[in-house]
Amino acid sequence: MKIVIAGAGEVGTHLARMLSNENHDIVLIDDDPVKLANVSHDVDLITLTGSSHSFVDLKETGLAKADLFIAVTPSEERNVLACVMASYLGAGRTIARINNSEYLQERYRAKLKNLGVHELIFPESLAAKEIVSSLKYTGTRQLFEFSGGKLILMGIKIRENAPIIKRTFDELAGEMAEIMAVAINRKDKNIIPDGKDMIIDGDIVYFLTTRMAQKHLFDLTGKEHFEIRNILFLGGSRIAQRTIEKLGDHYRIKVVESNRERCKQIVDKFDNVLVINGDGKDMELLHSEGLSKMDAIIATTGSSEINMLSCHLAKSVGIKRTVAEIENFSLITTAKSLDIGTVINKKLIAASYIYRFTLNAEISTVKCLTSSDAEVFEFIAKPGSRIVQKPIRDLDFPNEAKIGGIVRGENGIIAHGNIHIQPEDRVVVFTLPSGIRKLEKFFKV
């Protein structure tokens, strides 16, 4: 596939790194030659110094033969315009990163599609959705719902008190009929487990289950669900504001923000939020605002280091639920070792969303597991594809991947070996990066 990426920022470069390992013909265009030079040192791609809203420069990328054009510059106006121009020049499909939710309204989205902007991605909104999930489902590090909650993925940090610990999955089979462990992150090593594997203290384990079996999963992992009512946001960023919008009026919310103008903006926008103009690093201020009474701390300042430290300190004073926005990739491993709770990285979320458009199979969902290199795909099984030919145990599925469950009609089903996948089933698959391309042959027609 020929792919042109406009924007050599962190989203563009991360996406280029992901795709460069898969024999795509990638061209990266940016007006900053220094950024391009930094990427080209270790990524196999073509770089072009130029403007993404210049017909002349875009033509030089070979857009007329491009299957996919992705505009992820910091400017949403530039991204939208670039997609319109790219479509005119012959790009097969276009994706624009945006920062404004108005574009997502159906009447505007339809107009943009007519202009040649085929897909829109709003990373802050996707990140906010993950934060809301982490607040509603306490006891988990990460949670995704598939097909409206018919199947649920939970990433859970396992402690030594968990009944599930140090028992092989074969031994646990009777207790986990409606639960499947699909990925384990252990000291930065990623494991797709089989029946002989077991969970040990400190593992982050990703389980796929049904809504009915959630309580049983919490019992097995030694977790307790607790209700969150009082939430403190450190930083009033766009992610924070989108999260507050999605939370609605069911919570008591405070926001600590150092920028006075942004404070005024949040006050004007939300009636149910108490805004404090102050420094989120000021522990005396936080204690005076009732830090110890908070059920959750959401750190979304512009600094990954401050967010990480704030959540670490919040944990030390007994806050049960902490969420940190960590946009610096090099700090994610450190964040996991500090046990700061849920980690949100909007670049990984955005890259996962875009990634599905590069695969030769019908995919409704792609999710990146923040604490693991594994990816989660929700494929749609098509008539005539290899995945519907035999029961799961006879498919010779890649060792780097695992089928976790299927959604058939209104039912979520955990995928044991004797299940025969049917056309139009939605199939939830977990895979390490080395297994992604191997999956295509099972789902393409």
Image (cartoon, rainbow, N blue to C red):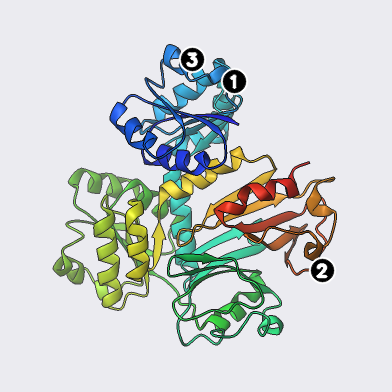
In this picture, residue 204 sits left or right of residue 339: right
Residue at left offset 72%, top offset 60%: 406
In this picture, residue 286 sits left or right of residue 186: left
Residue at left offset 61%, top offset 25%: 92
Q: Secondary structure at mark 3?
A: helix
Check the image and report above or below for 260 versus 91: below
Q: Closer to the N terminus: mark 2 or mark 1?
A: 1
Q: Quadrant of the C terminus?
A: top right
Residue 176 location (% of width, % of height): 67, 79
Q: Closer to the N terminus: mark 3 or mark 2?
A: 3
- Location of mark 2 (residue): 418
Q: Residues within 10 Å of mark 3 (few under 14, many from 20)?
A: some
Residue 322 location (% of width, % of height): 36, 67
Q: Closer to the N terminus: mark 1 or mark 3?
A: 3
- Location of mark 1 (residue): 65
Task: Tell me the tag on residue 59.
Answer: 3
The disc labelled 2 sits on which kind of residue? Asn
Task: Tell me the tag on residue 22.
Answer: none
Check the image and report above or below for 206 versus 382: below
Q: Nearer the viewer, residue 206 or 212?
A: 206
Q: In this view of the protein, can residue 255 be seen by the observer?
A: no
Q: Quadrant of the N terminus?
A: top right
The disc labelled 1 sits on which kind of residue? Lys
The disc labelled 3 sits on which kind of residue? Lys
